[in-house]
Amino acid sequence: MYSTSDFRRGLKIEMDGKPYEIVEFQHVKPGKGGAFVRTKLKHILTGRVVDQTFRSGEKVDKPDIAVQDMQFLYREGTDFVFMDLETYEQKNIPAAQVGEKGGFVKEGETVTVLLYNGELFDLDLPASVAMTVVETEPGVQGDRVTGATKPAKLETGITVSVPLFISQGERIKVDTRTGEYISRE
């Protein structure tokens, strides 16, 4: 069980038998009365966001979430298709449920996925990934100090802002949480 003091962004909890992820939380200590925690919770399976208030020190359950490595095969319409590495069973997850994380997985790559009661619902990506720039304006010598950026299309199809000196064909590191350029590979 989790206490309200354990709350943080991204923590997965179970409330009324349903799994939720904490999107936002705020500890409030009014002048009168007891302290409480105001939260925004996203339903893991449906994506619906609800507001919930907990008394300070209140306990909530941990959801039954399993972690498993699966291989990303391909995109089928609006779904991502993953394959279980042990049973070779294929599972689909809607792109809307994956969100922006889908832009950081390459075909054939092994990814850690999260399952709730055997149902695939989210990806657990590393903090950064290395990707190749496939399309951007040519790099210009001497543009290292300005701090200006330009758009660059990566091998998975997502676009990130990169410094002006980055050229097509270079490998760069990208932060998967924010989608920002980190460094050259």
Image (spheres, rainbow, N blue to C red):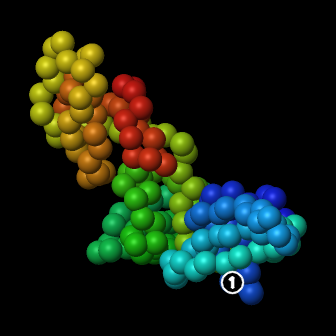
Q: Which residue is drawn at 39% across and 41% down?
A: 180
161 over 171 or under it: above or below: below
Mark 1, Cα crowd under 10 Å, few <14 / some 14-19 / many 20+, is few
The residue lying at 49 percent from left, 58 percent from top is 71
The percent coordinates of residue 54 (x first, y second) are 77, 74
SS at circle 1: strand
Quarter where residue 14 is shown: bottom right
Q: Is residue 155 above or below residue 50?
A: above
Return the x and y of residue 35 as percentages of the image width and height: 81, 66
Residue extending farthest to the top is 142
Q: In this view, does 151 lie above or below 96?
A: above
Query: How many marks on residues?
Result: 1
Task: Measuring from the top left, give residue 121's x and y in whole percent.
Answer: 55, 72
Asked whether, in this view, residue 144 is left or right of residue 30, the answer is left
Residue at image mark 1: 18
**Side (left or right) of 95 relative to 54:** left
